[in-house]
Amino acid sequence: MTSSSSSLPVAAATTAGDRGLLRAVLALGVGGFAIGTGEFVIMGLLPEVARDIGISIPEAGHVISAYALGVVVGAPLLAVLTARWPRRTLLMALMAVFALGNFASAMAPGYASLSMLRLFTGLPHGTFFGVASLVAAGLAPDGQRARAVGLVMLGLSLATLLGVPLAARLGEALGWRAAFVLVGLIALLAIALVWRGVPDLPAAQGASPLRELNALRRAQVWLTLGTGAVGFGGMFAVFSYVKPTMLEVAGTPAAWMPLVLALFGVGTVSGNLIGSRLADRALMPTIAGVLLWSAVLLAGFVALAHHPVSAAFGVLLVGTLVALGPALQIRLMDVAGDAQSLAAALNHSAFNMANALGAWLGGLAVSAGLGWTSTAWVGALLALGGLAVFGVSLALQRRG
C-alpha cells in the first residue's frame, strides 16, 4: 500500500517544520470553514429563501439537493481533469470557483437560477477537501497524517458550531442573500491564506487523468467508499430530523434549539479531534470501533430522545460520529496507489451520498408511521451495514 506522502515531493514532506505545517493547515482549514458554512447555512434560511423567490419550503429544499449533486459530480470530475495542476494553484482555483458561486447565488433572480448556481458552487467541494487532505498528510511528520487531515476537516466542524449560526443570523437580519455574500468573503480570505501558507508543491510525478482513473479499478477503494456512504448515513438519518424529534418527542422548548444545534457542533469538533488521533495510532481498529460506536449510540438515542436534557446530550454524542471522516480519508490514501487525488476527492462524494441516503431512509420510516425516533433505528442499521462493508474489505485484505 502507498501512503499519501508518496503523492508529494519527499523533500517537502520531510523539511516542513511545525510552524509551516500549522500555517498550511490553518489556511486549508479556513477553506473548509467557508465550504461548511456555505453548504449548511441555507438549511436554516429555507423559509426566507422560499418567501423571497416565491416558492414553497419543500421546493426551496431542492436547492440543498442541487448543491449535494454538484459535490457528487464535481469531486471525481475535477480531480481527474486537474491531475497535473500544481497543488497550491489548484486549491486557490477551486476556492475561487466556490467564492464566485456564492456571490452569484446572492444575486440569483429565481428558483431555476439559484438551483443551477448552487450546483455550480458544489462542484469544487470534494476536490478541495481531497487535495487539501493530501497536502496536509504529505506535510505531516510520520504517524501524524490523520491528525493533519483532522485539522483540515476541523474547519468543516467549526462551521457547524460558529459559521452557520453567524451566517444564519446575518441572513435573518439582512436577508438570505447576505449570508452567501459572507461565505464568498470567507472564501476570498481562504485564497489569500492558501497563497501565503501552503507550499508551492507540484502534482505527483507522472500524474495524469488516466492514472487517476485507475483508482476505480481497485476493489478496496470501492469498499472504503461504500463503508462511508452506508456507515456514515446513520448520523444523517438522525440529524436530518433532529428538530421535529427534539420538539415533538423530547418536548424541548423551541428556544433551546440553537443550543441543541451548538451541542451538535461541539460533538463534531470533539469527534474530529479524537477520531484523528485514534486513527494515527490504529487506523483499522478505529474505523471498526467508530462504526460499532455509531450503531450502539444511535440505537440508544431512541431512549435518550424522550427527555429534553438527555436528548440534547444524545445530539452532542451523535456529532462525535464524524470521527469516521479522517480515518476513512487516510484509508483511501493507503489503498488508492498512484491515484491519490481522485480517491481522496471521492471520499466527500461518499459522505454526500451518506447524507442523501440517511435522510431518505429516515424519511421513509417516518412516513410509514413509525415515529420520529425510528430514524435512530434506521441510523443504527446503516452503521451496521457500513461495518459489514468494512468487514468485507478486511477479509479481502487478509486474503491478498
Image (cartoon, grey):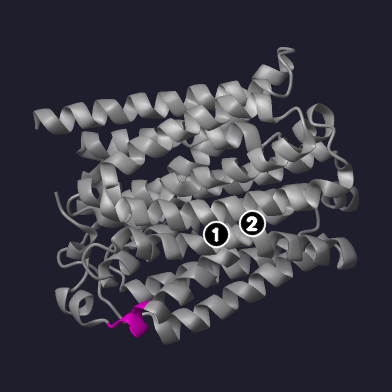
Q: Which residues are magenta?
A: 17-21
Is residue 60 located in the magenta-colored stretch of the structure? no
127 left or right of 310?
left
> Quick one: 75 or 305, which is closer to the camera?
305
> Quick one: 395 or 130, which is closer to the camera?
395
Rendered residue at 41%/39% (across/down): 290
Task: Give how far across and how far down residue 19 sits, in percent.
Answer: 36, 84
Label 2: which residue? 160
Task: Give how far across and how far down residue 368 sits, in percent.
Answer: 71, 12
Neighbor class of circle 2 (other Cα within 10 Å; few <14, some 14-19, many 20+) is many
Rendered residue at 66%/18% (across/down): 365
SS at circle 2: helix
SS at circle 1: helix
**The C terminus - image quarter:** top left
Residue 69 vertical placement versus 274 (above, below) = above
Task: Give how far across and how far down residue 63 sits, in percent.
Answer: 70, 46
State the mark number for residue 363.
Answer: none
207 left or right of 62?
left
Distance Cα–Cα, label 2 vs label 1 = 7 Å
Is residue 19 located in the magenta-colored stretch of the structure? yes
Rendered residue at 71%/56% (across/down): 41
Observer able to see residue 116: no
Observer able to see residue 160: yes
* Image quadrant in which you'd find residue 223: top left
Rendered residue at 60%/49% (across/down): 67
Task: Give how far across and how far down residue 34 sits, in percent.
Answer: 59, 66
